[in-house]
Amino acid sequence: MAGKYIELINPGYSTLWTRDLPYLAGSGDAAAVNPLNPDDDRPLVEGEFLQLTDSSNKPRFTRGGDNVVTVTGVPDGESSVPAWLYFQEKGRYDAQSTKMCHCIIGPSNFEFRTRLIYSSGLSVNDQVSVWDWDGASGAFGITRRCLSAFSAGYAIGRVSRIYGTNDCAVIFGI
């Protein structure tokens, strides 16, 4: 299965573990935000990473981070908690009305290709973690939760292949 920014390589989607949880607005989100609506000001895109949060004893997914990129085009480290891969199945329009985020939570060692990664300085087998990033020179228009070189906190996985600039395959959880 593939989207604009993400493609599952191995194993197939049907063997992966998923979790649907409500979205909790984070910093930078308007009060009436519905990031599952593609026409929203800050829509989620397949391949973004969401973190699990506890709000009123109810688990929810949120973007996390501080929604700030210090220098345009350069990732801002935010990998202080584990994060999960947002992946919306094609034709699943019920998510917009229920505001449920569909995230892949395991198992470890699945491989995916992502274009939401800052690949500058990365090599095969390097660890990656979640960062706030606005794309190369601010290309996304808004801050997204993407991958970049691991420096501290939680590693999401390791680079298994580099296809080109900001286009890599990652093995989750190792």
Image (tube, helix red, strand yellow):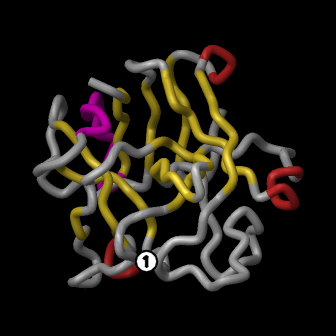
Q: Nearer the viewer, residue 39 or 18?
A: 18
Find residue 83 and report its horizontal and vertical position in percent.
41, 45
The quadrant holding residue 79 is bottom left
- Residue occupying image coordinates x 52% and y 31%: 105
Residue drawn at the location 29% of the way across and 79% of the way down: 69
Seen in the image, is 173 located left or right of residue 97?
left
Q: Note whether 64 is above or below 90 in the view shown.
A: below
Seen in the picture, residue 131 relative to 105 is either above or below; the reply is: below
Residue 131: percent from the left, percent from the top?
30, 60
Q: Secondary structure at mark 1?
A: loop
Q: Is residue 40 left or right of residue 51?
A: right
Quarter of the image that includes the N terminus:
top right
Please state the horizontal and vertical placement of residue 126, each as a whole percent of the image: 15, 36
**Quadrant in which residue 174 is drawn:** top left
Secondary structure mostly seen in the magenta stretch: strand
Left or right for 2, reference 115: right
Q: Residue at x 50, y 19 (%)?
A: 10
Residue at numbered disc 1? 139
Q: Is residue 39 left or right of residue 126?
A: right
In the rendered structure, which amino acid carries the disc numbered 1? Ala
| Highlighted magenta segment, given as a residue range | 155-166
Numbered marks: total: 1
Residue placed farthest to the front in the image? 56
The image position of residue 29, as x and y in percent, is 57, 80
Residue drawn at x 59%, y 40% is 103
